[in-house]
Image (cartoon, grey):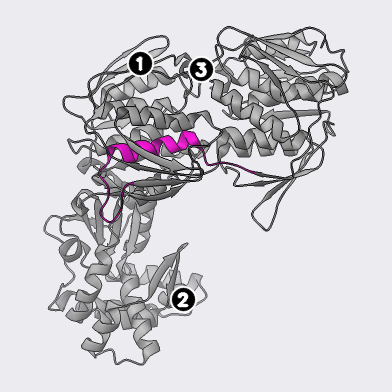
Amino acid sequence: MYAIAHLDIPPLASAGGTVRLPGSKSISNRVLLLSALSAGHTDIADLLDSDDTRVMLAALDQLGCRIEQRPDNLLRVHGLGGQLPVKGAALFLGNAGTAMRPLTAALALLAAEQGGCFELSGIPRMHERPIGDLVDALRQLGCPVDCLGQEGYPPLRLGNGTPSVLRLDQPIRVRGDVSSQFLTALLLALPLVARERPVVIDVVGELISKPYIEITLNLLERFGVHVQRDEWSRFTIPAGSRYVSPGLVHVEGDASSASYFIALGALAPAREGTDGVTIEGVGLSSIQGDIRFVEAARMMGAEVTGEANRLHIRRGQWPLKAIDLDCNHIPDAAMTLAVMALYAEGTTTLRNIASWRVKETDRIAAMAIECRKLGATVEEGADFIRVTPPARWTGASIHTYDDHRVAMCFSLAAFNPDGVTVRIEDPKCVAKTFPDYFETLFELCATPAAHIPVICIDGPTASGKGTLASEVAKRLGFHLLDSGALYRATALAAQDAGLDLDDETALARLAAHLPLAFRDHRVYLAGRDITDPLRLESTGGMASRVSQHPAVRAALHGLQQSFRRLPGLVADGRDMGTVIFPDAGLKVFLTASAEQRAQRRHKQLISKGISASIDDLLADLKARDHRDMSRAHAPLKPAEDAQLLDNSDLSIEASVQLVLDWWQGTTAVPGN
């Protein structure tokens, strides 16, 4: 996950490959709650790991539900059988509507029946999301519910510590035209009290997001409760209803998340060596309503085929075809259509999307504002958005409103035909449902190497370039190339093979097929962890000798260039800006006096418990500097267009900030 202030996505050219989707958020949180309310234990496979599910898991733990991670990668939930071992708790539910609404209904009923008092709160945006229709329905039943701030909004107090008499003899009326989550919450909670008589729910107004209710009904049946439905206006929970664990539940891949990759396949040419985008984990037979996004994508020109647990998408008609669509059945996935509309011929209208206004943010307003930044003409109304694509695209800094779907949707704008960079602010907001979204996207996408930004940090031994490069890469979310590690690894491999460090031909042959791997900040040579030996002074000395050979440097040239991957690279070494990446957007040459560098290295070695002499270190550094600067091939020197950074008297933080400021000056994005 990119836990950085913003992520710049360079122009993308093609896409292809296979993506395995994370579990469905809607199914995951429903299954967690049903498992907790059931008798017996439930094993859950492929549960989504995200902010929203962690919120639900934490709440269930506070309520006394025992949850354990099984060694077979299953999550086991030990059900409470409808009984609350904890009679009071303050639950913080973040911005997770799929936790707030169902827990409100379940805890209000259980607190009223068994005695208890619970407070539910969230982040400020959650306190702006209406819940009054659900509160009204619960009060009809006789549940004590208090709004602790503005009436009709969280935070809430449920119950007053003493049992209440529930009124179950009359139908419960709940509005269905604002959010389907209110009805879902009642459907999940009422089987807990439908013992002696059936309980009836009447829906007032046109029910929106019906596919989400279908998910709820499907899961209720799996846990032993068969709800009778009269069209979409009346739901009856039979007398004697009781939740029973089904034993094992598999969570489908998230169909809403699939929409981004369906769109990706629809608008991007197939990457070389692929036949488009394949999605695993969800298929045409999914119980999730957002799978009907496939129909909309086909209407716009995408070629989509599929089976039970897989979809395959290829670009078909191009430009895409504008559509006019009632999106009541795909409220979340329809956001992706607004970005696809930027690539369509004509004006696209998305209707019946009033529920967007009360989601993580006002999504109609958000999509309109951000599409306009890219150059589109946008009209918005109470329940519609109309998008006409840009005549010419403009680079933009996309504000994401702490809304995961806004961030993921607008990543697709990087395929724009005018080759402009798209900046995604606060990219970590995707943690709500798809923490690894951007990493997954970049694995599928390709673009010419020249479009992938590179920062080069060159300098002499012990100048601090490795630390500086690592910190800059971390701040930008870029990949990191420690070129010195490649020469050190070559030296260790030569030592293992018994090679003479002056045998240029043998060393070059070895370097060309170096069995090197980088995993989890560790370095492996032929499967052996060499991270610690790599940093020994003796290894550095051998590496300095090895790097003198032009044939060795040529052998490692291609390997170093292969690190240039999306979304960008920070490379440190001695010839990164002069030889390996001469087209880098920013080149920095780091300097410090030999005496200053010797003191730093001495302090570093002492901190590791390694004895060292400053005089010896100083002599060694001067000898290495002489070798590096005087070699005939790729000598150590600043690139002509490099920024010089003398860090003798600068802290690492000050050096990092200076490099970031330089980088910001070379990559200004309109709207930032």
- Of residue 366 and residue 155, the one placed in the foreground of this image is 366
Where residue 22 appears, as percent x and y from the top left, is 52, 44
In the image, taking residue 97 as reference, residue 413 lies left or right, namely: left
Marks 1, 3: nearer the viewer: 1
Where disc 2 sits, the SS reads: loop
**C-alpha span from label 1 to label 2:** 55 Å
When the figure is inspected, residue 145 is found, relative to residue 106, above or below; the finding is: above
Which residue is tagged 2?
527
The magenta span reads: 250-276
Where residue 210 appears, as percent x and y from the top left, is 55, 20
**C-alpha span from label 1 to label 3:** 15 Å
Q: Name the amino acid type tagged 2.
A: Gly
Q: Which quarter of the figure has residue 143?
A: top right
Where residue 380 appears, as percent x and y from the top left, is 35, 12
Where residue 636 appears, as percent x and y from the top left, is 19, 70
Residue 393 visible in the snapshot: yes
Q: Which quarter of the figure has residue 340?
A: top left
* Residue at 34% over, 32% down: 410
